[in-house]
Amino acid sequence: MLKIITSFLWSIAIVFLLGGGLYFSIKLKFPQLKLASLFKGFQKDNKSSVSPFRSLTMSLAARIGVGSLAGVALAIYTGGPGTIFWIWIAGIITSINAFCESYMGAKYQERDGDAYKGGPSYYIKHGLKKPKLASLYAVLIIISYIFGFMTIQANTITTSIHGAYGISSILIGVVLALISGISIMKGLDEIAGITSKLVPFMGIGYILLSGIIICMNFNKIGIVLMQIVMDAFSLKAIRGGIITTFIIGMQRGVFSTEAGLGTGSIASSCSHTDNKISLGLIQVLGIYFTVFIVCTSTALLILTSDYQLLNFENMNGIELTQYALNYHLGKRGMAVLMLSVIALAYSTIVAGYYYGESNLKYLIKNVSKSQINILKIITVILLIIGSVMNATILWNIVDILVAILAIINMYALMKLRKEIIVDYKNNS
């Protein structure tokens, strides 16, 4: 039943994501391809405690989670190498959606003490004039991140450590929950500080590791890249499998980048600057880094191994990446992956919690400290539960939630398309 619901929702979501991405790309003359303009938002004219760079690292922390490791592996395992081609295509086309949602989030942002807050709920309410839909989106964000995204991160950390060292899953979950709980208790500045330090560190570390393995297998890279493209358009795919390959690639691509979900605008709205167009364009860089560096590195690690010999049940996805690194580097590879997973998933957890808290503040205007603390306690408990839940069920739930978020957010952006186009042309 979950698979039927997922397929139905994603058939709609893909139309919105790709259709909206193509529409905005054409109308705005493909700003996502003008690389020089993507860096202008780093100019130091921000007027809040969270700089554009820190807002970018926060959104990257949410994006570069287990979707870049486990999600990509799951895509290859279930849909074949051709799914990576569609992840690339999804990244290019939907990156403009990240700009649109981040710009609108910044345009309708509101003060939150010494900081700022914003996101789809704010532009749906004030721009689209649909407060009920805005509230529904806020509720779905809380459910998606606190109950979905964060539990799959916990599950991946548990699976990775348990698979490598046999440590009890429940013990891992309790330790992860305690560490994450300490961080989220300290608030936005602490979360932004963690992600601004951890994201560059883990990004550079993972790229260096991947680069070493790619160099070790340089003679295979050309063949692997050809395999990715050929599998996306193979005769087998054309006879029916291409739809499955395409949908899986889109699902995993959108889960990895979150472009079109609206969540990136929650992070970018923490920063306040006069140049909101440039602030929005920065988020395109985050999409490209996630897709073409992190996700592609993971794919090359797997596709240069003998992963075809494996057979998994109740697969999280991280098992395949773990196997590939063990194949290339032995036990050292498993240790490195474990550290990468912990860093990636942990940063996603703390950033994802902020998304949930931000939308709780939208729903409850004068939210009390005790209400926020209840959310934090629920988050900690769910991290423990997610550590021992069935991974297949978790992924199915997450896929459904992602599709619903994408449909609502892209609907709002398309209804606000004239405003976005006019603002861009007047201010770029």
Image: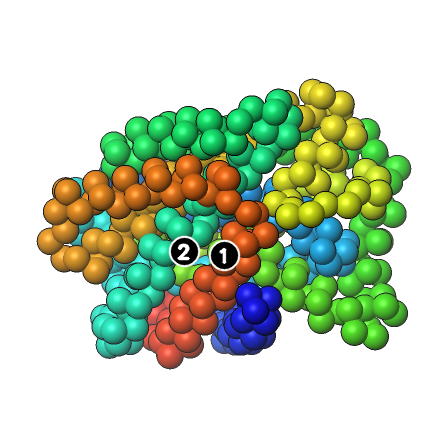
Query: SS for tag 2?
Result: helix
Numbered circle sitting on residue 144? 2
Question: Which numbered disc flags the more N-terminal residue, 2 or 1?
Answer: 2
Quarter-wise, where is residue 417 in the image? bottom left
134 is higher (above) or lower (below) than 327:
below
Query: SS for tag 1?
Result: helix
CA separation, marks 2 and 1? Answer: 7 Å
Please tell me which residue is depicted at 55% across the width and 39% down the height of the picture: 156
**Crowd band around label 2 with a 10 angstrom C-alpha radius: few (<14), some (14–19), many (20+):** many
Asked if marks 2 and 1 touch (Cβ < 8 Å), the reply is yes
Q: Position of residue 111 (x, y in %)?
A: 17, 52
Q: Front-most of 15 and 140? A: 140
Which quadrant is the N terminus positioned in? bottom right
- Would you say residue 105 is visible in this rendering? no
Please tell me which residue is depicted at 71% across the width and 67% down the height of the picture: 244
**Crowd band around label 1 with a 10 angstrom C-alpha radius: few (<14), some (14–19), many (20+):** many
Q: Front-most of 257 and 173? A: 173
- Would you say residue 312 is visible in this rendering? yes
Q: Position of residue 224 (x, y in %)?
A: 83, 47
Q: Front-most of 208 and 162? A: 162
Please tell me which residue is depicted at 65% across the width and 61% down the height of the picture: 248
Q: Position of residue 260 (x, y in %)?
A: 47, 63
Residue named by callout 1: 398
Which quadrant is the C terminus positioned in? bottom left
256 is higher (above) or lower (below) than 195:
below
Amino acid on which the number 1 mark rests in the picture? Val
> In the picture provided, is 54 more to the left or to the right than 336?
left
